[in-house]
Amino acid sequence: MKMEFENIAIIGAGAVGLFYGAKLQQEGFSVEYQSRSSATALQKTPLDIKSIWGDFKLPVKAFESTTEMRPADLVFLSCKALPQIDYKNLITPVLQKDSVIVVLQNGLNNDEKIHELFPSHHIIAASAFTCISRTAANQVNHLDYGPITISPFEQSSNEVTERVLSVIETSGTPCNIIPHHRSLRWEKLLWNIPFNSLSVALGGVNTKDIMQSSAIFSSISELMNETLEIARADNVIISPERVERVIENTREMEPYKTSMLIDYDLKNRMETEAILGEPLRTAQKYGVHTPVLKTVYNIMTFLNENNIQEKS
């Protein structure tokens, strides 16, 4: 297998994809971006990054469709994890025989979906713990944190995962590898399930608002405990130290408007199924009682369907 990642594709280049792609581009990698909503603006105006790691601007090659892009050695899938996405048609145009697919998405069971569609390709699960948002079509604001964690979907991808680690670290982004991709997903869900959902369900509050309320923090703890129980049933044990670190990191971060809240305010479809629905269905599969998660999922499903404003 070719181990040099000369050409990189960012599919679904929102705030996360644009930021990490731009960091790679800064270091000389040849990067192309797919963004249905922002391609036209990005073709006309350089990408403007405001970051705690240093501000910078650079022109980018952006396209509305992956059919316009060249084949890539390394593909970052960073679009919202929405159930209606046709991943086969979205990803296939940029694939070549040895392409590696990095699934940089929220939620559960995305890696399995991509592996089922592309079984001959190496699939790397990836998760970013960062506070980042897009303030305009060509502007990204990186407020806090930023490390990426990656994990091979299959053991046969261990060597490739090390190479992906090296590429990410070359861009100045801290990165580490954990051996089991399901652990990576559940550790991110430990934050995403309570904070993303409650930020919307409570009427639009940021992380600082949530952490300052003892009453709301009680609900955060209940959702976290239910998440830990489902993960345990799924053979993933998250240590108490990890839980405390997640809470402390959230307490220390800059006031952050979560990705679900941003989508809700923009009347975009939220990642309700990936972040809440899949964990809930996993709980039901294993017979884990999750009354708080079920209630929050029902509320978020209602808000999702009654807030959405489909765009042409």
Image (tube, rainbow, N blue to C red):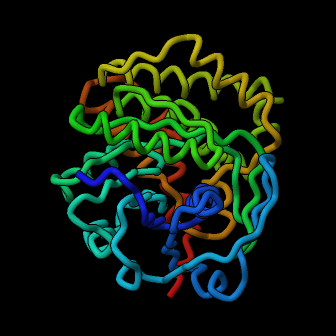
Q: Position of residue 190 (x, y in %)?
A: 53, 30
- Looking at the picture, tell me which residue is in the foreground, 143 or 248: 143
- Looking at the picture, tell me which residue is in the foreground, 30 or 266: 30
Asked if 214 appears above or below 267 in the picture, the reply is above
Q: Position of residue 282 (x, y in %)?
A: 31, 34
The answer to which image quadrant residue 197 occupies is top right
**Residue that appears at 72% across and 83% down:** 45
Outermost residue, top side: 240
The answer to which image quadrant residue 207 occupies is top right
Q: Is residue 40 left or right of residue 157?
A: right
Q: Position of residue 294 (x, y in %)?
A: 44, 37
Q: Number of labelled discs?
A: 0
Q: Position of residue 270 (x, y in %)?
A: 53, 59
Q: Is residue 251 left or right of residue 6?
A: right
**Residue that appears at 48% across and 65% down:** 10
Asked if 228 appears above or below 48 in the picture, the reply is above
**Residue that appears at 83% across and 29% down:** 212
Q: Is residue 21 left or right of residue 155?
A: right
**Residue that appears at 76% across and 42% down:** 144
- Looking at the picture, tell me which residue is in the foreground, 206 or 17: 17
